[in-house]
Image (cartoon, rainbow, N blue to C red):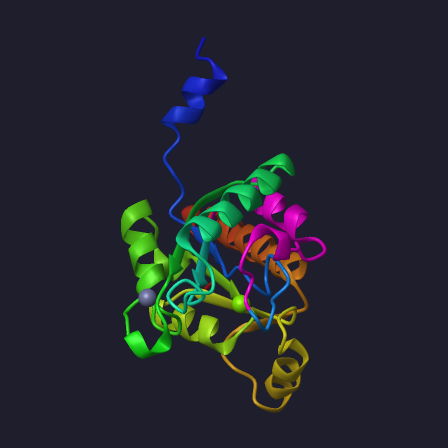
Amino acid sequence: MDSIGRIGNQKPASKVGVFLDRDGVINEERSDYVKNWEEFRFLPGALQAIASLTKAGFRVFVISNQSAINRGLASLEEVEEIHRRMNKEIERAGGVIEAILYCPHTPEENCECRKPRPGLLKRGAKTYGLELERSYLVGDKLSDIGAGQAAGCHCVLVQTGIRGTQLASAEKSNPGNYRLCRDISEAAAWILQIEGENSRSTIRSAHGGSSVD
Ligand SMILES: [Mg+2]
Ligand SMILES: [Zn+2]
């Protein structure tokens, strides 16, 4: 009989990724940047939300603009240390972040990876074998949504960043082509629900029904 480990290894990796922005989604955003682990505070429900995505089989990634690096406010080592300790807490809660992709550049450097450009998402898709059209992006800024839309992802805007409430009222007067959620918990619940509906419609279409998109 195969061990559970062998069956696990033989299962093909999912091509559906969930890309989470960091500051304002996973942890509290600061107007003066999160520069070290002492300044890092998980938002309520974030650890459980990431664990719920992992347990449902999603491959979870973080994509983050970290211009504090090239502004000279945080060193690469400090940022890597934040990510090491963040991952440790997430794993302790039952979640897995497969990779953290971040842009160290300032806006003036005009790079391809700083959101709203889709460079980080495209790099992630290529490196980890993901289908962006089937993947999700969760962010707290319209620049996150811009990157997600340019890459063809399903996008969720959460209201837990510094400008969260302003964004929510703008959304009400001018709804965009993305889902508005209160926070990462609501975003994760929505993604789980959509994927559940997708897999049910795939089963239906495999039996001769029409697929619902
Ligand atoms: Mg953010
Ligand atoms: Zn960049």
**43 vs 154, nearest the viewer:** 43
4 to 16, vertically: above or below? above
**188 vs 27, nearest the viewer:** 27
46 to 33, vertically: above or below? above
**8 vs 68, nearest the viewer:** 68
Ligand 2 visible in quadrant: bottom left
The residue sitting at the bottom extreme is: 173
Side of 162 where 116 appears, left or right: left
The residue sitting at the right extreme is: 44
202 to 163, vertically: above or below? above
Report the magenta residues as a range. 33-61
Q: In which quarter of the image is residue 171?
A: bottom right
18 to 31, vertically: above or below? above
The residue sitting at the front extreme is: 72
Side of 49 where 100 appears, left or right: left
**Residue 123 picture location, percent across and down:** 29, 56
Give the residue at x 65% y 53%: 46
Quadrant of image for the C terminus: bottom left
Q: Can residue 159 be seen in this view?
A: yes
Give the residue at x 36% y 60%: 121
**Residue 167 picture location, percent across and down:** 61, 81
**Residue 179 picture location, percent across and down:** 57, 71
**Residue 201 picture location, percent across and down:** 50, 53
Give the residue at x 38% y 38%: 13
Whether residue 24 appears in magenta in the rendering, the answer is no
Whether residue 45 appears in magenta in the rendering, the answer is yes
Quadrant of image for the N terminus: top left
**208 vs 165, nearest the viewer:** 165
Give the residue at x 56% y 84%: 175
Side of 153 where 23 appears, left or right: right
Q: Is residue 58 visible?
A: no
